[in-house]
Amino acid sequence: MRPIGSAAQWQADRLDVGAYLDRLGITGPLEPDAQTLRRLHRAHALTIPFENLDILLGRGIDLDVDVMQDKLLRSRRGGYCYEHNMLFALLLERLGYEVTRLYARPILDAPKPLPRTHLILSVAVGDETYLADVGFGDEGPLEPLLVSDGIVSEQNGWVYRLARGEGADKEWVLSLKRDDDWFPLYWYATEGHHHIDCVVANYFISTHSSSPFTGRVFLERIAEDWRLNLNHRKLTLTRADGTGEVRYVVDAEVRELLAKQFEIELTEEEAAVVVAALPAPEPS
């Protein structure tokens, strides 16, 4: 598979590679091989949180390279799939990888079809192809997966499977093991996409009333052996061994919680806007 269109449309030359690697804590030589890809993917997934707060703060999601890197790298904020995977693709390209942007349709036990708007990456390394995805939040992989039918990847207790799907539009399905069964996360086809496709899909996801990222507080954080999810007031901690904890946050703790648990620093004014977007607490 080869990337479509001109590489100039992505403006990888504007990426501050030094700031990116500093954000990830990566030093030393970086040859464009499978080992480096795994190292970078893991570092990004463990470092930069998933969050939608700029939508709630009325700023929207801007896919300009300078805006994204100022937010995720220099301001040490997080983002959602477009920001994560678009920046990660630029880093890989600057380091010598061949990257194709693809779209996936989340499955997630949804009662009806979800929009095919999740951005993922196909990365060529020699004669092999890897699925890279640093933007799927707390159920996403720590490491890239070799694109091979039925391959299973154990990642610090989290187990993923990539397998052939049914039909040309469902070429591959990524699943996460839960108990003794496979939970499908999303399917995707290998049709490459242009920058303008990302702009259009991002506009829908960041503005439409039916989007899961408008009208609610949503943050996720990945560690090697646990995952943390804040969905409105519900804070869920899930461990790799299947255990977990659930509790509901109160207004007074929101700003400190975001700083300590998600490493996102908000001003008092920004935190007040986020708190105002939360639903009323459940009656005690």
Image (cartoon, rainbow, N blue to C red):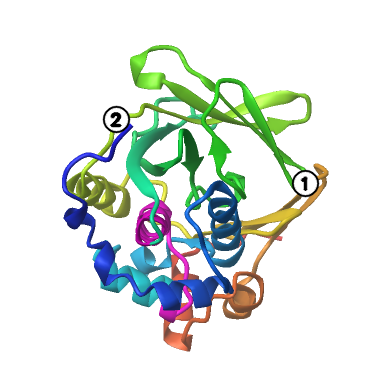
Residue matched to label 2: 191
Q: Residue at x 34, y 38 (%)?
A: 102
Q: Is residue 221 left or right of residue 89?
A: right
Considering only vertical position in the picture, is 57 above or below 213? below
Amino acid beneath label 1: Ala
What is the span of residues highlighted in magenta in the rendered image?
74-94
Q: Of marks 1 and 2, which one's residue comes earlier in the chain?
A: 2
Q: Main secondary structure of the magenta part?
A: helix
Structural distance between the alpha carbons of marks 1 and 2: 33 Å
* Disc ID at residue 18: none
**Residue lying at 42% horizontally and 20% vertically, measured from the top left:** 171
- The quadrant where residue 1 appears: top left
Residue 46 counted in the magenta span: no
Q: Nearer the viewer, residue 101 or 212?
A: 101
Q: Is residue 181 visible?
A: yes
Judging by the rendered image, the residue that carries numbered circle 1 is: 240
- What amino acid is labelled 2 in the image? Glu
Q: Which of the 4 quarters of the picture holds residue 230?
A: bottom right
Residue 114 on image: x %, y %: 39, 32
